[in-house]
Amino acid sequence: MAERLKGAEAEALAGEHLERAGLRILTRNYRCPQGEIDLVVEDRDVLVFVEVRYRHTSGFGSAMESVDRRKQQRLIAAARHYLAAQHIDCPCRFDVVAITGTPSTLEWLRNAFDTSP
């Protein structure tokens, strides 16, 4: 249960950071059969699917590195589901917000990956 709370806290921290940067949160924790999208936000005319990763330490790899190709493919599939379910056709991108340690260091990588196979 403690790990779930840390995940929720990391997502809240990431959401606050994105809002301060001028993005608007549309959806939190979108779940579908293909997976989960932590945050769906609007950055002007671009829909952004955000993966939030938290690591207490980087001893086993950084939070950013944990978004591997398999995770990217699940996010892409979930994003396609979201777009179809919401009947949305607009420019999209995938961002990663990586949070490490206590006190936390936050790294926001815009356009972290694309939908190429």
Image (cartoon, helix red, strand yellow):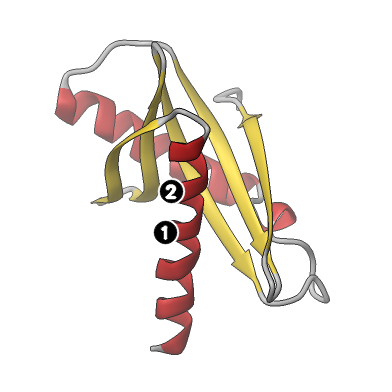
Name, please, the residue furthest toward the bottom: 1
For this view, does 109 lie left or right of residue 7? right
Percent position (x, y) of residue 90? 34, 11
The residue that disc 2 covers is 15
Q: Residue at x 38, y 88 (%)?
A: 1
Percent position (x, y) of residue 18? 49, 39
Q: Which quadrant of the view contains residue 59?
A: bottom right
Q: Residues within 10 Å of mark 2 (few under 14, many from 20)?
A: many
Q: Which quadrant is home to the C terminus?
A: top right
Q: Which mark is residue 57?
A: none
For this view, does 19 lie left or right of residue 80? right
Q: Residues within 10 Å of mark 1 (few under 14, many from 20)?
A: some
In the rendered image, the vertical position of residue 28 relative to residue 85, given as above or below: below
In the rendered image, the vertical position of residue 54 relative to residue 20, given as above or below: below
Q: Secondary structure at mark 1?
A: helix
Q: Amino acid at mark 1?
A: Ala
Q: Nearer the viewer, residue 23 or 71?
A: 23
Q: Which mark is residue 12?
A: 1
Do the residues under discs 1 and 2 have CB atoms within 8 angstroms?
yes
